[in-house]
Image: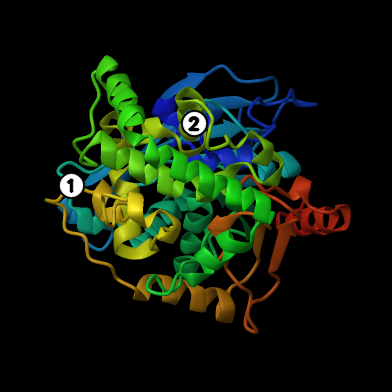
Amino acid sequence: MLRRRIGRVLAQAGAAVLLAGTAAVPAAAAQGTGPADIRAAIEAVPGLRVVEEKPAAPGFRFFVLTLHQPADHDHPEKGGFEQRLTLLHRGTDRPTVLFTSGYTVPGAQFRSEPTELLDANQVSTEQRFFGASRPEPADWTDLDIRQAAADHHHVVEALRRVYRAAWISTGGSKGGMTTVYHRRFYPQDVAGSVAYSAPNNVDDHEDSAYLDFLRTVGTPECRAALQAAQRALLERRTSLVAGYQAWADSRGDGFQLVGSADKAFEIAVLRAPFMFWQGRGQAACPAVPAPDATDDALYAWLSDVAQLPVYADSVANQFVPYFYQLGTQLGYFPVETAHLADLLRHPGATEPRTFVPRDIPLSYRPQAMRDVDRWVRTRGDRLMFVNGAADPSVAEPFRLGQGTRDSYLYQVPGGTHAARIAQLPPSDAAMATATLRRWAAV
């Protein structure tokens, strides 16, 4: 999930699943078809505004848009906000892919894997309450999966005036979850959905699947090396936290939201094994530092794997909506602490409450995830799940049931959180691609 500029590191977490190897849009074989002035057609859509058009690769046009959304779709009279979107236009005769980021929307053009496979248009959405897509003043009770699904329904309704061919929805990680939630409430909006690496935490009080997964993934030697590195980091926390604080001070940053540099450091250490398997996998085991490694080596490894900068206020405050959703509906994964119990100082530090200001109420509502899981198993239709077999995020995956129709679950052997159709065994990749093309009538 977490690679490039620290300021964007979690904002693009969902998108990173689909962008590997596709961030640059390749030149198209032919110009897209459609109205002589596609911009005029878009601007004629009620509530839609073109913020700017940016340069695009041959055969494409790229727009940054906003669409007016009610803050509460049940009570539109209460006011609204402008949801930020991007549109990569290929041609009105082509399918359109709705990419749900789950976070902010990348400002640069890119194509998700389904967009490439279908040579499609792509509409990418920013999730409500993220980035610039926030009602003011913000009523946090308006941030739930049903309201967000209504946002995406409105996007499809609005742009279908221009793009009348088949629509496909997709997203990765939290964006993949968002894709499924949209289909739960508006099952006929699109012809099919591809959800990559989407967790399905049905019962947040029973999270043993995550711990069991982390106790068995990879080799025993690699798991032992990760635990040894964690202990070494915490045993040297005084000097390492001092460096962490000095780094924040040099940027004019701090740790008011989390509480302190020491607490943020402890959270990063606790999350390191999960983040390691999610983003790297067995091939990265030789790079895990030994307990006698230098302070600099240990710190650099932790910062790279667990992304130390994301716990500082400049980044953490951008993701309050994410942790609010975890703490109210989505649920959160646990971490293993027994092997570190004598070194820990901050009980419950990894819980969502740590990352949400205390003046924002946080009460978990378990019925939301149970409802979605039940819908997938009993009434889900035209759903495709693509997961990495070594990704702890999907230790509790979406599962197909007797009532699920024309739906498929694929696993990339040894795959991480960046699993894609192209990484599947050839026969599975061919079947998945054929299914996607059939749904889109290509």
Secondary structure under badge 2?
A: helix
Depth check: give the residue in front, 295 or 319. 295
**Residue under the point 61% across and 54% down:** 391
Q: Amino acid at mark 2?
A: Leu
**Residue under the point 28% across and 20% down:** 246
Depth check: give the residue in front, 38 or 416. 416
CA gap, disc 2 to disc 1?
31 Å
Asked if 86 appears above or below 196 in the picture, the reply is: above
The residue lying furthest to the left in this view is: 359
> Taking 56 as reference, is 406 left or right?
right
**Residue where numbered disc 1 is placed:** 357
- Label 2 Cα crowd, 10 Å radius (few <14 / some 14-19 / many 20+): many
Residue 76, visible in the rendered structure: no
Q: Nearer the viewer, mark 2 or mark 1?
A: 2
Secondary structure under badge 1?
A: loop
Q: Earlier in the sequence, mark 2 or mark 1?
A: 2
**Residue under the point 52% across and 51% down:** 274
Q: Position of residue 296 (x, y in %)?
A: 47, 23
Q: How is the image coloured?
A: rainbow
Q: Amino acid at mark 1?
A: Pro
Residue 148, visible in the rendered structure: yes
- Residue 298: give its label: 2
- Residue 129: give its label: none
Number of numbered tags placed on the structure image: 2
Q: Position of residue 419 (x, y in %)?
A: 67, 48
Q: Position of residue 316 (x, y in %)?
A: 31, 37
Q: Position of residue 309 (x, y in %)?
A: 38, 30
